[in-house]
Amino acid sequence: MSERDEELRQADETVARIEIERWWPHLSIEAKHRVLRDLEAELDEEAIAEIVVIAARSGRPDAEPPVRLEAHERDYVRTQIEAVD
């Protein structure tokens, strides 16, 4: 691996993924419904685009949007849709 390739690899690793707690509450209802149809599926382009905008507005313009939810993110979403007594 060249020195430049190594620098690019390290730079990629420093770009943090935007936390679901930052974007899920602000995602449109329509996008939430699409995500909820299948929590294991890849997110659609519209949802990802919304997440990018939300990240920028929350001061994280360089944060990486998810393409697919990780296990802890699916758990978070499930807690957000449960009815509260």
Image (tube, rainbow, N blue to C red):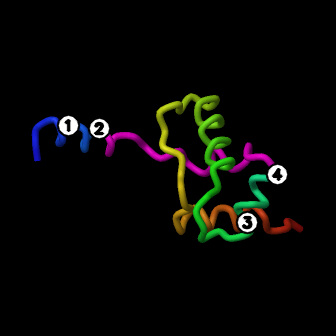
Dot 1 amino acid type: Glu
Which quadrant would residue 36 be assigned to in this image? bottom right
Q: CA distance from mark 4 to mark 2?
A: 34 Å
Q: Secondary structure at mark 3?
A: helix
For disc 2, the marked residue is 11
Q: Earlier in the sequence, mark 1 or mark 4?
A: 1
For disc 3, the marked residue is 36
Estimate the x, y position of residue 21 in percent, counting from the top left.
63, 49
For disc 1, the marked residue is 7
Q: Earlier in the sequence, mark 1 or mark 3?
A: 1
Does the residue at mark 1 contact the one at mark 3 (Cβ under 8 Å)?
no
Q: Is residue 24 magenta?
A: yes
From this viewpoint, which residue is outermost toward the front? 45
For disc 4, the marked residue is 29
Does the residue at mark 2 contact the one at mark 1 (Cβ under 8 Å)?
yes
Estimate the x, y position of residue 29 in percent, counting from the top left.
82, 51
Task: Please state if 37 lies on the left or on the right of 62 as rendered.
Answer: right
